[in-house]
Amino acid sequence: MFLVILSIVGVVGIASVGILNQPQFGKIPSGERLERIERSPHYKDGHFQNETPTVTMTKDKGSLSAWWDFLVQDHPSTIPDSGQIKVIKTDLSKLDKNQDLILWFGHSSYMIQAAGKRILVDPVFFAGAPFQFINKAFPGTQIYAPSDIPDIDYLVITHDHYDHLDYETVTQIKDRVSHVITGLGVGSHLEYWGYPKSKLTELDWGEAAEFSDGTKFHCLPARHFSGRSLFQTKTLWASFVLETPSGKIYIGGDSGYDKHFAHIGKAFPDLDFAILENGQYNENWANIHTLPSELPQIAGDLNAKRYMTVHNSKFKLSTHRWDEPIKNAEALREKGFDVIIPTIGEPVEWKKAIVAPEQNKTVEN
């Protein structure tokens, strides 16, 4: 019997190693990259840490219990019926690159056009999991593919979770990406997948990268975590401020509420647009995702001219109704914040139009 059990354990172990060696799991940092990570003030005891000590799962419900509830319990209306989510297919190649636009692909994937540059953020066109069968996209939302993406000046990856960094997508668009901006360590995955090191800029919180075309990226904190396999928090999660001649845009990534929002609002008092997380929240992981009740506080802390919320309407990663985040965005608008709520695939202007009293007409800021 012992030998049988040992054989079974051995087979399971070999199968596990085989699965984890699949390319989509990426590669943890090593060598010079790891040495740089270890010099970061945010990397302690072998992993990156949030500014505020953070329990990933709340203490009243352990990880196993929370996952059991998510995977096994019945949660009505978490996935929409076919046709319930409206989508628009836009020919991205025909967009005027000189228009300051944003186009949302669902969940946390979107393309920004600013000052003649295209910035693609967290593109996921397949699944928010290592294998597509684990977490399929909502019916009707998969209207864009990597082949639809035009040449990209900057690819921004906020962190390396599967619903933000999709192996299939980033490898298929690789030859159309001029440069990548991401947090420390995330470049290890991308380099493993064929991105040349010269195309990768990895930043720590508080660092910035400025380019000759007038584009600047400020890497800023978020309250979250990272990892694509058994190795967690070995790569940095981040938010960014994109600074261009057209204006400043806050790219929020995934984040629970913390003091960093107020600090960012004070450091960048003239934000034109802020993109906030809104979806896949749950009281069981309240520290690492934005709860609906926290959205007004975050918007107030940042004090941007205009807002948009993402992280919804494509994948089921929590237990709330699929349309609840849309209602959250509407509630934020009702509180007096200028919130755009675009349809998936709809190009919209991200800059807020201002009425000039002396001319009594609308002009672009």
Image: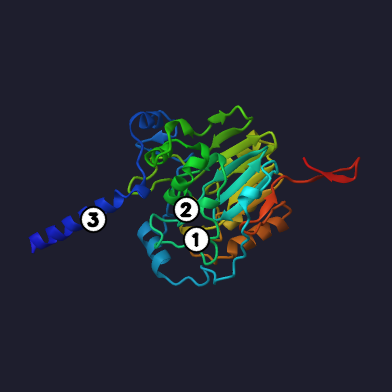
Mark 1 → mark 3, Cα distance in angstroms: 28 Å
Relative horizontal placement of residue 306, taking residue 72 as reference (left or right): right
Q: Earlier in the sequence, mark 3 or mark 2?
A: 3
Mark 2 → mark 1, Cα distance in angstroms: 8 Å
Sort mark 1 into few (<14), some (14-19) or many (20+) by Cα contacts within 10 Å.
many
Q: Quadrant of residue 220?
A: top right
Q: Position of residue 245 (x, y in %)?
A: 69, 33
Instruction: Give the residue displayed 63% in from the left and 34% down from the top.
Output: 267
Relative horizontal placement of residue 11, taking residue 288 as reference (left or right): left
Mark 3 residue type: Ala
Relative horizontal placement of residue 330, taking residue 165 as reference (left or right): right
Contact? badges 2 and 1 (CB < 8 Å): yes
Q: Which residue is mark 3?
A: 15
Q: Position of residue 116 (x, y in %)?
A: 66, 38
User: From the image, which quarter does the C terminus lie in?
Assistant: top right
Instruction: Give the residue displayed 51% in from the left and 65% down from the top.
Output: 138
Q: Which residue is mark 2?
A: 163
Mark 2 residue type: Asp
Q: Which residue is mark 1?
A: 315
Q: Position of residue 302 (x, y in %)?
A: 65, 43
Mark 3 → mark 2, Cα distance in angstroms: 24 Å
Badge number at residue 347: none
| 94 vs 333, nearest the viewer | 94
- Using the image, determine if residue 128 lies above or below residue 257: below
